Amino acid sequence: MTGHFRPIAHLPPRVTLLTSLVTSTGLLLASPRTWPLWATALLGLVPWIPPFALGAAWNYRRYHWLALLYVLVVTQTGHFLEHVAQMTQIHLLGLQGAAARGVFGALDLEWVHFAWNTWVLVAALVLVCRFRNNPWLWFTTLFAGWHGIEHAYILLIYLGTGVVGTPGFLSQGGLVGGGLPIIRPDLHFLYNLIETVPLAIAFFWQLRHTGAVRAVTRSSGQPLESLASAATGP
């Protein structure tokens, strides 16, 4: 029924191959140099920005709001991988302090954490208004709200005291009952895991339902608007 539905822009193999070659060449040229980790990672990421932007534009032209969900999934997954890197530094490499702040440690600032979670929450709120029947998107939105509130509290503490890295609500030493027996990096790794996995599921759930609506539209000859409630809600 949905065999002809293409939810994601498929990059031509030559574009993927060329981007991979550019990335590999850049990393090979950088390997003998003593560049900071963030610079090497950025060198590997930059070549993929144009294909990502083209894919988002392609999806927007055809599927509109689904493109925003695509962008949110990709960016939040990248953010989650930064937390994975920090967990590797702390628990596998035994690093601490400034040496255990992820790949882009210079961005490990309370303002940045707050701004990022605000972006995720605002985007999720916009999307859940559009895709009201998506249960995974509802869960992601509610959890992103909790995550955002905690970072707002942490930011307020920082603005009032100048102290960075405070525990917030639930990490060790936190506001709620002294927090859980878990340090803030570990807790926020779990926060982002709980946020990212349902978000990815929400994306594929929406792809499947949007594909079903489009397939029914083609077979029935009815306008898409008359069937959109099947995918977006009343």
Image: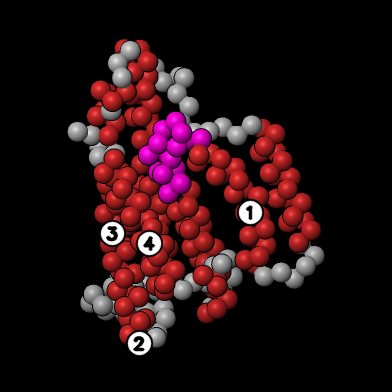
- Dominant secondary-structure state across the stretch colored magenta: helix
- Residue 53's x, y, as percent? 55, 44
Give the residue drawn at x 75%, y 71%. Answer: 34
Query: Disc 4 and disc 2: Cα gap in Å?
Result: 22 Å
Indicate the position of residue 127 as horizontal and vertical percent values: 32, 45
Please give the label number shown on residue 145: 3
Tag 1: amino acid: Val
Residue occupied by mark 1: 46
**Could you tell me the amino acid type at mark 3?**
Gly
* Helix, strand or loop at mark 2: helix
Q: Which residues are magenta?
A: 58-73
Residue pointed to by mark 4: 117
SS label for mark 3: helix
| Residue 189 makes an appearance in the image | yes
User: Marks 1 and 4, how far apart in space?
Assistant: 23 Å
* Residue 66 shown in magenta: yes
Circle nearer the N terminus (3, 4):
4
